[in-house]
Amino acid sequence: MSVICKVDNLSKSFRTDFYKKPIHILKNISFKIEEGQFVGFIGPNGAGKTTTIKCMMQFIFPESGTIQYFDHMDIQSAKKRIGFLPERPYFQEFLTGIEFLKFHWNLSGLPRNKFAENAETILAQVKLTHAKNLKLKNYSKGMLQRIGIAQALLASPDFLILDEPMSGLDPDGRILIKDILKKLKERNITVLMSSHLLEDLEELCEELIILHQGETLFNGPTIDFKKNFDSLEVAYAAFKRQIGYNYNA
Ligand SMILES: Nc1ncnc2c1ncn2[C@@H]1O[C@H](COP(=O)(O)OP(=O)(O)OP(=O)(O)O)[C@@H](O)[C@H]1O
Ligand SMILES: [Mg+2]
């Protein structure tokens, strides 16, 4: 099976103040994602998931470590095959839904004549056809999340990186997005998805990466992580007890 993404020994520190020492946020993060896998990215708030994803997208750069895509493809070519939903997408509120998609389509340098057909298909999938000419400032939070997901899917990526895709969605919205993702699975698309909604991850992801305080504590099949527990939620709670995790610490 071909390797879609391989992250090795990623380290990143942030300096919050000129006079303060940098804080070590990512500590030798390593994991591997193979073709067709759906991978859940789990960890408490502040574990380093978004920072890892930002490094993967080259929005920020690690002090050390390497990131490889599609069996050593150069990063610029690889990026054209990656769809990305940020944790906090920026929505130009004066644009309509369709203009927002067009803006992203043009940014990715794709052939202009293919936009209309792709956009209509994606808008129908995320159930926003009726709102395509509405300005984003008039979208609800869930509608914004769905147009954000539409943007990530627009260029038919081979690898999708979704930072909390279910955030802000009502139960029907979550079912809609899960159904879209399940269809992608049938087409062998690879997905890395961070979320705190363990039930959704359990349903979708056969692999897990678990970060804790900037370290990779688990990278393997969901079924192995769950062991004899009834659900991922119970298994994760037991795992946190085992490592002595305390939310208030
Ligand atoms: N630019 C920055 N400068 C300083 N600290 C930062 C910066 N970006 C992130 N951090 C810190 O890095 C740590 C990890 O943040 P990150 O956003 O990666 O966590 P996360 O796992 O995505 O959490 P969440 O589940 O809340 O989204 C946090 O302590 C955060 O405050
Ligand atoms: Mg995050």
Image: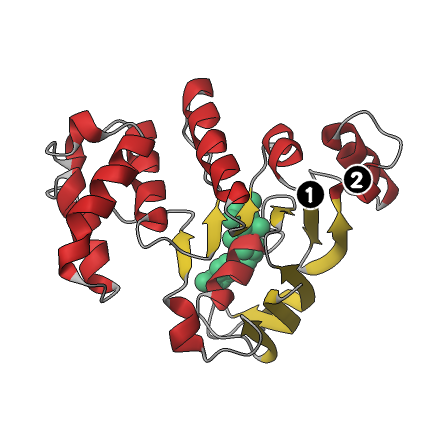
Percent position (x, y) of residue 66? 59, 77
Disc 2, SS: helix
Residue 106 x %, y %: 18, 61
Visible in this render: residue 64? Answer: yes
Q: Taking 75 as reference, is 39 left or right?
A: right
Residue 59 visible in image: no
Q: In this figure, which residue is indicated by the disc labeled 2?
A: 223
Q: Residue at x 41, y 63 (%)?
A: 81
Residue nearest the viewer, comparing 135 with 88? 135
Q: Which residue occupies the foreground of this view, 223 or 188?
A: 188
Q: Residue at x 57, y 73 (%)?
A: 67
Residue 200: horizontal and vertical position, in percent? 59, 31
Number of numbered discs overlaid on the protein picture: 2
Dot 2 crowding, Cα within 10 Å, few <14, some 14–19, many 20+: some
Q: Which mark is residue 206?
A: 1
Relative to 191, 229 lies left or right: right
Residue at disc 2, CB closer than 8 Å to ligand 1: no
